[in-house]
Image: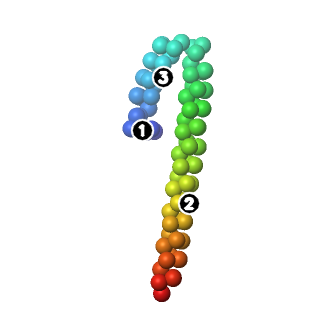
Amino acid sequence: MNIFGVGLPEIAVIAGLALVIFGPKRLPELGRTIGKTLKGLQSASTEFEREIKNAMSEDESANENIVDKEN
């Protein structure tokens, strides 16, 4: 398992440090917050990708119309 170049041992060390720093009571809350943030970033990324694809397809259709008018 390799997430962003971080393997399983590194993830275990990070999780252990987070447990020591934040404590067992705040760790679930922190996990939920991080999960919600990542989900928001993922949806924003998906929306951005959709907008780029729409703009590219509109540009291609406009270019095709110009070529058709020239012929």
Marks 3 and 1 in Cβ contact (< 8 Å): no
Asked whether 30 or 18 is in front, the reply is: 30
Above or below, 31 relative to 56 = above
Observer-side mark, 2 or 1, equals 2
Q: Residues within 10 Å of mark 1 (few under 14, many from 20)?
A: few
- Location of mark 3 (residue): 15
- Residue 32, quarter of picture: top right
Secondary structure at numbered mark 1: loop
The label number, if any, that marks residue 21 in the structure image:
none
Residue 34, image x, y percentages:
55, 28
N-term-proximal mark, 2 vs 3: 3
Observer-side mark, 3 or 1, equals 1
- Location of mark 2 (residue): 54
- Location of mark 1 (residue): 4
- Amino acid under disc 1: Phe
Going 58% across and 43% down the picture, which residue do you hit? 43
- Residue 10, quarter of picture: top left
- Amino acid under disc 2: Asn
